[in-house]
Amino acid sequence: MPDKWKPTQEQQTGVISSVNEFITDELNELQKALDCPDEFIYDFLEEIRNRWSPDSCHSKARQHKKENPDAY
């Protein structure tokens, strides 16, 4: 099995940190707009997380598109 992918330090302190901050800000705004509990945000993130499961149809479609760019 190949080694698990790991981001570089530059990626962690750059784009990953920026996206983390952006998503956190958006979730805080969503929670404020809905006046919902943390549990709702947690469950909402689980739904999003499931789209990136290696077994999900979304993940398989992304991989197929990556491997066959001329088909799209």
Image: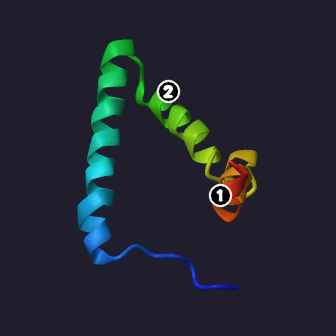
Q: Amino acid at mark 2?
A: Phe
Q: Please state the horizontal and vertical placement of residue 8, each as a whole percent of the image.
A: 34, 76
Position of residue 54 measured from the top left corner of the image (x, y, whole percent): 69, 59
**Which quadrant: the N terminus?**
bottom right
Which residue lies most toward the front here?
Answer: 70
Q: Residue at x 49, y 27 (%)?
A: 40
Q: Tag 2, which secondary structure?
A: helix
Q: Amino acid at mark 1?
A: Pro
Residue at image point 60% right, 37% down:
47
- Left or right of residue 1: residue 46: left
The local crowd at label 1, few if under 14, some if 14 to 19, many if 20 or more residues have their Cα within 10 Å, is few
Q: Is residue 1 above or below residue 59?
A: below
Q: What mark, if any, has residue 11 been given in the picture? A: none
Residue 68 appears left or right of 45: right
- Please tell me which residue is depicted at 68% across the width and 56% down the height of the picture: 70
Of mark 1 and mark 2, the one earlier in the sequence is 2
Which circle marks residue 40 in the picture?
2
- Measure the alpha-carbon separation of dots 1 and 2: 37 Å
Q: Is residue 9 above or below residue 31?
A: below
Instruction: Say which residue appears at 32% left-offset and 49% top-offset.
Output: 19
List x then y, in percent, for residue 39: 48, 30
Tell me the tag on residue 69: 1
Residue in the foreground of this view, choosing between 19 and 36: 19
Coloured how?
Answer: rainbow
